[in-house]
Image: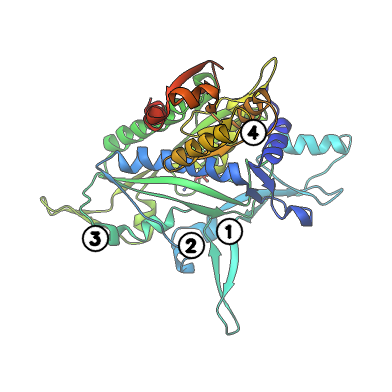
Amino acid sequence: MVTLDKIVALAKRRGYIYPGSDIYGGITGFWDYGPLGVELKQNLKSAWWKSMVQLRDDVVGVDAAIIMNPKVWVASGHTDSFTDPLVECKVCHKRFRADKVDEQKEHANEHEGNVQWTEPKQFNLLTEVYLGVTEPKQKSYLRGEITQGVFVNFRNVIDSSRVKIPFGIAQIGKAFRNEITPGNFTFRSREFEQMELEYFIKPDEKEGERWFEYWKEQRMKWYQDLGISKDNLRFRDHEEKERAHYARFATDIEYRAPFGWSEFEGIHHRGDWDLGRHKLTYKAEIAGEEYTPWVIETSGGVDRAALFFLLEAYKEEEKRIVLRLNPILSPIKAAVFPLVSNKPEIVAKAKHVYQLLKQDLMVAWDDRGNIGKRYLAQDEIGTPWCVTVDYTTLEDDTVTVRDRDTTKQERINISQLVKYFQEKLRE
Ligand code: GAP
């Protein structure tokens, strides 16, 4: 079983994820993505966008500003209700979430059971920012969910595109929460990215149930299609008391992480909460009726997805560590090696192959050490294919392509390589 420590170590060693502000000792709840991490996140976001926007006729995208008029957060209920219950240890004054019983228990053990807690009080998670050049500066917030940027543009999107209910607006972007206890690596951060769909439907109980079930299944399938095993995924319905202030009902897609079943993505039936609060309605063209649509939301975390896909992919085998990432997600699709680095014809040919592949794919170059070691280095970062230019290449223009998962090699003509990888990436 993979531990979180192993992923944290590999992520730093190989350039997936570093602690934020590392040279100054870090800062709780913030993380930086390295050369491989940025590619992984980009690939996750592209796969999500393709499935949620590009391949659909009923969804369009937006990219709204992170900072909004503070009136938005009053209307949406976040200034009042975007809270977590906070308790403080009376012994050392450390603060915890009252609804995370395990974290409290763990802390009680540190004090050998002699711990007393303050009464829970509600702690607002919005991060304040101050803008402008005259005092007092204008107070606003970094968005606590990316969602409100979609709602405030509801009219704009209807007026400027051809969407008709039922339809969705998708968005990917950063959100910020002043989490009481950030932790489990990137799992609970104070700055993170969300990928969300707000799907607008007629206000009708049956429609609501139908679309809620539809989106639950779609999202579950997406994680499985990209390689998360069925056994490590489950739905969990929220109980009434844990539901967000905007949700009529809510289900999480959970992942079996080393630290227990944990939320991957939330599917929420937001009813008419948001559009109602922003006083926005929809006018059906044909029937002419005007109503406040209901919203079914799918809200996933890019950082959680990056972490969970890394955990799922990590395998320790007899002779190697391998990240069995779906090639679509792998940061580097192919690594190109000259068999030897002291034969100019072989190096020049390998450089030619490298430049050729680079036009269409993220590729890496490696001419250090022996081929076996180069394979191991690529396995550990999840590169699905290694291409070696050898003596035979000089005779017949073929190269060996070694597969990460089977470790088998086949010879492919250089002229067919791009097509070969593109077909594999479409499988
Ligand atoms: N718009 C709805 C919404 O924001 P949420 O359940 O609070 O719902 C949705 O958040 C997703 O955002 C979560 O399932 C998770 O993937 C991600 N997320 C939320 N808080 C996070 C945090 N502190 N760190 C990393 N990801 C987080």
The local crowd at label 3, few if under 14, some if 14 to 19, many if 20 or more residues have their Cα within 10 Å, is few
**Most extreme residue toward the bottom, as rendered?**
134
The answer to whether residue 324 is above or below residue 330 is above
The answer to whether residue 232 is above or below residue 148 is above
Label 2 element class: helix
The answer to whether residue 55 is above or below residue 74 is above
In the image, what residue type sits under mark 2? Answer: Trp
Which mark identifies residue 73?
2
Residue at numbered disc 1: 126
> Which of the two discs, 2 and 1, labels the residue nearer the N terminus?
2
Residue at numbered disc 4: 341
Q: Is residue 119 visible?
A: no
Mark 1 → mark 4, Cα distance in angstroms? 55 Å
Mark 2 → mark 1, Cα distance in angstroms? 9 Å
**Most extreme residue toward the left, as rendered?**
286
Q: Nearer the viewer, mark 2 or mark 3?
A: 3
Q: Nearer the viewer, mark 4 or mark 3?
A: 4
Q: Which residue is painted at 49% across and 68% down in the image?
A: 70
> Which of the two discs, 3 and 1, labels the residue nearer the N terminus?
1
Residue at numbered disc 3: 160
Q: Are marks 2 and 1 in contact (CB under 8 Å)?
A: yes
Which quarter of the rendering shows the C terminus? Answer: top left
Label 4 element class: loop
Q: Are marks 3 and 1 in contact (CB under 8 Å)?
A: no
Picture quadrant where residue 412 is located: top left
Q: Nearer the viewer, mark 3 or mark 1?
A: 3
Point out residue 399 in the picture as x, y percentages from the top left corner: 49, 25
The local crowd at label 1, few if under 14, some if 14 to 19, many if 20 or more residues have their Cα within 10 Å, is many
In the image, what residue type sits under mark 4? Answer: Ser
Q: Which residue is painted at 69% across and 34% down in the image?
A: 10
